[in-house]
Image (cartoon, rainbow, N blue to C red):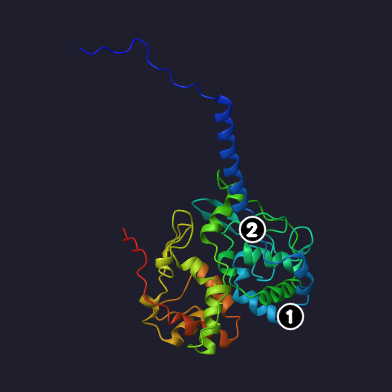
Amino acid sequence: MRFLPRHLPRAAPVDVKRLAAGLALVAAAGVGAFWLITTPVAAVDARQAQALEAGDAARGETIFNAGGCASCHASPGQDQRTRLGGGLALKTEFGTFIAPNISPHPRDGIGAWKTADLANAMLRGVSPSGEHYYPAFPYTTYAHAKLEDVRDLMAYLRTLPPVEGKAPAHDLSFPFTIRRGIGLWKALYLDTSPILPDPAQSESWNRGHYLVEALGHCAECHSPRNALGAIVTSQRYGGGPDPEGRGFIPNISGKNLGAWSHDDVVEMLETGLTPDDKVAGPMAEVVKNTAALPKADRDAMADYLKTLPVVEGPARPKSP
């Protein structure tokens, strides 16, 4: 028969102070890493700011139309595309985002902004006060725009009428109210690489590539989103449910536009007429912008859109 020892060895006492200090160190390191990763990064610093103030307003009008600024920022309830008092509500699963006043009003709009402020907002999603903007503002696509285009856009915006009145604040639920967390989202999804010309393609195609993928931000509406609200890369341009629950946004990849002619695409961008119907809803507002572009730009957009590969997007829900 085996006998157990009368006295088992005792475990070493836990050094509570040392354990607490270690945990505090780990927590501090985590907070520091979070703070570093989520720090807003500007596109333009103070040294570059002054050089951006001499823009071309006439050219900026084309950027304004290509960027679709009026579709979101024109004051609702009136038909003047250049009264940019904001107020349009965009309902999403994260809450309701409200488009701000971007008229040159010195208090309620962006009249006090420098061009560098607009560049940081569009190219990096950073406000003049150094906070993250929510990606409901499509800076994820504008990030590919040229700095000189932002400069000219600001020159044009300064020629527009100032509109009094601030737009309401966003109506979001926790934790989406914590703007700092957008820095993590940007680390995952914000691509700031420029759009470089493809020497194998025509000048028109390259212009269309830039208009569609940078200024026009077409993929922002015509692509499905993942659970974090980012575009599903494999289904880019594949269409999907309208975030506001207003139906289904069409697939504009080669799956659908492959059956359209070049002239069909140009006609839609100018008049809203399609081979089978006429665009409506938000797309009708987009057409007001593309119709104001030079014809060469609509041709360029058609040249590029006609080369989009076939993408199988989400299936349309069956009609009840």
Residue 130 sits above or below residue 8 on the image: below
In-image side of 118 versus 144 (left or right): right
Identified at 43% across, 17% down, the residue is 10
State the mark number for residue 226.
none
State the mark number for residue 56.
1
Provide residue 66's location: percent of width, then percent of height: 60, 76
First in sequence, mark 1 or 2: give its number: 1
User: Which residue is the site of mark 2?
Assistant: 87
Callout 2 amino acid:
Gly
Provide residue 60's location: percent of width, then percent of height: 69, 78
Mark 1, Cα crowd under 10 Å, few <14 / some 14-19 / many 20+, is some
Task: Identify which residue, 54 or 96, lies in the foreground.
Answer: 54
Residue 149 occupies quadrant: bottom right
Number of on-image labels: 2
Say which element carries label 2.
loop
In-image side of 57 versus 239 (left or right): right
Say which element carries label 1.
loop
Mark 2, Cα crowd under 10 Å, few <14 / some 14-19 / many 20+, is many
Separation of marks 1 and 2 at Cα, in angstroms: 28 Å
Provide residue 146's location: percent of width, then percent of height: 64, 75
Residue 133 sits above or below residue 309 on the image: above
In the rendered view of the protein, which quadrant contains the N terminus?
A: top left
